[in-house]
Amino acid sequence: MKTFDDRIGRSFDVHSRQLSNGLQVLLVENSAVPAVSINASVLAGARHEREEKAGLAIMASRLLDEGTETRSSLDIAEAIESAGGHLEADGSFERIVVASTVLKQDLDLALELVADLLIHPVFPEEYIAKEKTRTLAEIASAKDRPQVIAGWALNELIYERHPLHRPSHGYPETVERITREDLKDFHKQFFTPGNTILSIVGDFSVADVLPLVEKRFGGWPSRPVTLPAVAAPVRQTERRQQYIPMPAQQVNIYLGHLGVERANPDFYILQVLDTILGGGAGFTARIPQRLRDEMGLAYTTFASITMSAGLDPGKFVAYIGTSPDNMKLAIEGLLNEIRRIIDEPVTPDELKDAQDFLTGSFVFAFESNSQIARFLTHAHVYGLGFDFIEKYPRLIRAVTADDIARVAHKYLDSENYTLTVVGPVDEDGTVEGTSR
Amino acid sequence: MSLPVDSGTFTGEVRRTVLDNGLTVLTRELHASPVVSAMIWYRVGSRNEEFGQTGKSHFLEHMLFKGTDRFKKGEIDLLTLKNGGGNNAFTSHDFTAYYFNFASDRWDVALDIESDRMVNCVFAPEEFEAEKKVVLEELRMGLDSPWGLLLQEVDAMAYQVHPYRNPVIGWQQDVERATAEEQQEYYRKHYHPGNATVVLSGDFDTDQVLEKVAHKFSSLPSRPQSAPVTAVEPEQRGEKRIRVQWRSKVPRLAIAYHAPEIAHKDSYALQVLNLILTEGKTSRLYQRLVEREQSVTFITADYGESKDPTLFHFRAEARGGHTAEEIEASLYQEMKSIVSEGVTQRELNRAKHLVEAHFVLSRERAQDQAMLFGQIETLYGTGYIDTYLERVSATTSEDVMSVCSRYFTEKNRTVGYLVSDGSAATEEDSDEVADEDV
């Protein structure tokens, strides 16, 4: 009889092809609905840009659909929207992604547009200027959100000189500095077929779609790419903190420190730890159970070390938004749970429940075509293997309480952490209207 | 125009069953992924709340996780964890809904939980008081959001009579004084089989599933329906304006027009107009305000299906020294040009394709299907979906001009600006930025 895990751990039949110009193509046929999703990922992002031009990668990604050699911004929008499709270009620290979802009959149109955006963008001056004022306005708007400000401050203190210290969209002064030449250079340097993964999932046959891919992407000339090395961030060995006054109802509190890379062999053990400490289903994890359900301190509280793991080390974060009067209680509550998972073994029940949760809920990451396309890219970038779906339950089931104790001790720190607080507090941490 | 997808196929695969005790059951088989989404929808929301008792429906949603005799506090979440699933709930003006998503070999536990907590929820005073703190934190979190605050104030002003004027989470003073006894009475009144719809979507066999549902739910006693909500919002007699003071210097604008309820003959043309005005980069307001005038970071509109006549909201955020007044004036000019010149066939076709693609893509995920059918059944009946594409497709430029001229009028609108209360940081402080990606 098949077990739960076998039932869910079905792999996709992934057709992997490399075009002669080096473009990696990953295809999965899925006829569940008459639609197709495309995910084209260029493996360069904000982690590769220079500090004085921070925001370059994101701006480049956002300008891809604002004009190509043969299409205006409006032409591109007309083409995709008149078909009822989606087309978006966006970036992160690691990647620039052009993604599209269309009805099956519009697959070739989507491929044509995705190829055009990647290969022939022109970065029109007019749109560079627009994008700058828009980015500056969005930064100003984001600053109205105390949780965002607390998160930004946390990154600055944890990552120091590593690229992840800065916001992926840059700072107002670095955004202002970006020129059309910078954008064109960034495109020339990193946008090559050999540095791109094209994942396509949906209602088509591989035999039909390969010639279309060849037609749209085959002429993209290959060029060697050298990705700049990124020096590893240094883990803090002392406590850091920043209180940022803002008139608000709640104080938003982040507590954290440097975390792990996605490739870290302890990643799966840490996923189980995350589930027990600050994630999982509903409010079952220790932090939400204690701080929300028992103490009533917050609506939102969580913790995770694996969520932000990538090519670079992510960060361990614990978050809570609470009334100013509860600030000390909340910080102490977060620290208590961090100490407890470092000092005491998790119970057999906690371990088993977390494993059941992770192996059982894994299936929800693969429901839609766009989710599967993202997974293919992800699996390729991190070398997970396309049988990852079958391997994953075994990786999670192999985790023991001793493993968790070991990784908690190794990667969590209840002494040398960074604390950022935004809300009605003074810069020295005094809550308005109360004594310290 | 021909549509490659027949709208009838959307509900053709949905079976509707009504148990003797009045419980409605919708089942939709979907075998693409080995998952099942199990929802229950109650026809109760903030529209059912009385003066001084706002927020009860939402608070009740929280209490449904706080224990029955059979499932003690925390056990519902624990069962969800052990079975590798997800759960949550949400409350609106019109309904309260709960969902579980599980792999398809272990989802029955959702039926156990829902059939039990429909009638057996205990309201332990200490649990009630503890949860009140959580709800009040949720309320404060909403007030720290610029749009949460502005829309709360605009809606409260737009309605004079109808309970849609109250925030779903309730007014803070009402939530603070709420009692477990009142909460329990409200629960008994609104949580019973005749006021609920179970919606199951995913990888199962319908006949087997209906047997299970009958087994779990048919012993629950039927109860009389509570009195219908009778409040009718009178016609608005003139423009209303409010300047809400807040800590930010970024000007934000919300405009609300009274608009009709679900399946009203004008609602389809208004939905089409919404798409033409704000959906995508080709939309009129995007082209005008983001592209040409560059006066906003975004402009968006919201006109959702609702049981009673509702509000059609526009929201925009100013950029680069532009003012809310400028944005407002441009918005009115664009509407004026639609009233005088209509919209193009190209715009109508695009709107129809967007709706069609949206319907197709909603079939990818079991939960999206359960959401769609549950909401529409609760508000009106799933027949709405069958005719929806047809009605959207039949919409003409004249229809759009007509609704634009009749609904988007000066006297029918409430305009809210979010303006600085003087506490905002000065511009010199505003260069400290970091990543929001935490």
Image: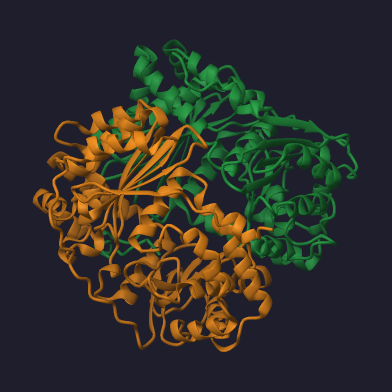
Chain colours: A orange, B green
For the N terminus of chain A, the quadrant is bottom right
* Residue shown at 60% from the left, 44% from the top: B367
* Residue shown at 33% from the left, 27% from the top: B284
What is the residue that sits farthest to the top in this orientation? B398
The one of A365 and A198 positioned closer to us in this rendering:
A198
- Whether residue A56 sits left or right of residue B280 in the image: it is left
Q: Pinpoint residue A315: horizontal percent, then vertical percent.
A: 40, 72
Q: How many marks?
A: 0
B45, above or below A360, in the image: above
The one of A322 and A185 positioned closer to us in this rendering:
A185
Q: Pinpoint residue A111: horizontal percent, then vertical percent.
A: 29, 36
- Determine if residue A294 is in view: yes
Q: Pinpoint residue B333: horizontal percent, then vertical percent.
A: 33, 23
- Determine if residue A143 is in view: no
- Whether residue B199 sits left or right of residue A55 in the image: it is right
- Whether residue A76 sits left or right of residue B158 in the image: it is left
* Residue shown at 66% from the left, 81% from the top: A347
B330, above or below B417, in the image: above
Q: Pinpoint residue A92: horizontal percent, then vertical percent.
A: 31, 57
The one of B401 and A32 positioned closer to us in this rendering:
A32
The one of A83 and B291 positioned closer to us in this rendering:
A83
* Residue shown at 39% from the left, 15% from the top: B339
- Whether residue B245 sits left or right of residue B320 in the image: it is right
A263, above or below B403, in the image: below
